[in-house]
Amino acid sequence: MAGGDLIGIGLYTPAEASQLLGVRSAKIIRWLRGHDLHGKHYERLWQSQIDLGDNEVYLGFRDLMEVRVANAFIERGLSPQKVRRAIEIARQMIGEQRPLSTTRFRTDGRTVFLQVLKEDGSDSMIDLFRSQYAFREIIEPSLKNIEFNAGGIPLRWWPLGKHARIVVDPQRAFGRPIESESSVPATVLAAAAKAEGSPEAAARIWSVSTASIRRAVEFQTACDQRLAA
């Protein structure tokens, strides 16, 4: 896959995805590559959007959004195997290769998981999906601050909310988080504030507003704290 082919898709290493999502990179690699444990092979949850031909794991923007939702279910006690089966059913029902992050999944996802429950008979899944409220309690925070197109496909993500002015958009800067007022990557502005000793000094060097620098610093701090949690 050439660099030009990545426009509109985004490109993230597991480490970069981990910093953005607060999900350990080792987990992300297992979910997208598959792994062996105690003599048993576990298939990947889904095929990544990105294959650069170097046998490394990379994520596209849609993969980022899928990881958020998959992680929410796994943190609530579902096994990755049940989530994989739900993805398979949802692909058929919703008609999307990466269904978890679509708006259709908001409405049809509970039926998807109830189908897995029917196949599996797990008591823990009964507890999670008996009520519509319990399902929405998991899915809604995972799809928060995402903008969708008319077909229900995610377009861009505001990690701290629109008010924070930091956006992850695969159409811009290969999906790197940027400060929306200046269109400069947030990591660059945050690093400038550290190097120059103050937001004001960094703003003069980069010819952006001091508010842009402060927003980038706030975002970088939030990412660092999320990763350390």
Image: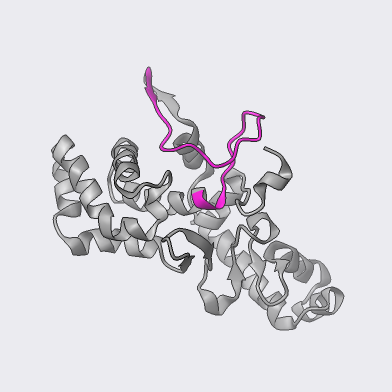
Residue at point 51%, 37% (across, down): 29
If the image is split into quadrants, where does the N terminus sit? top right
Say above or below: 203 vs 2: below
Left or right, 123 with reference to 223: left
Point 46% across, 65% down: residue:
148
Residue 56 colored in magenta in the image: yes
Q: Which residues are magenta?
A: 39-62
| Spot occupied by residue 160 in the image (x, y as percentages of width and height) | 52, 70
Across and down, in percent, residue 56 comes to 62, 33
Q: In this image, 175 relative to 163: left or right?
A: right
- Picture layout, residue 158 above or below residue 115: below
**For residue 134: magenta?**
no
Q: Quadrant of residue 196?
A: bottom right
Q: Residue placed at 27% from the left, 63% from the top?
A: 137
Q: Position of residue 74 (x, y in %)?
A: 33, 46
Is residue 122 shown left or right of residue 53? left
Residue 33 higher or lower than 94, as above or below:
above
Q: Which color mode does the image show? A: one colour
Kindly report the secondary structure that dominates the magenta region of the rendered protein.
loop
Of residue 91 and residue 109, the one placed in the foreground of this image is: 91
Q: Quadrant of residue 90?
A: top left
Q: Position of residue 110 (x, y in %)?
A: 23, 54
Q: Nearer the viewer, residue 154 or 65?
A: 154
Residue furthest to the right: 205
- Total numbered labels: 0
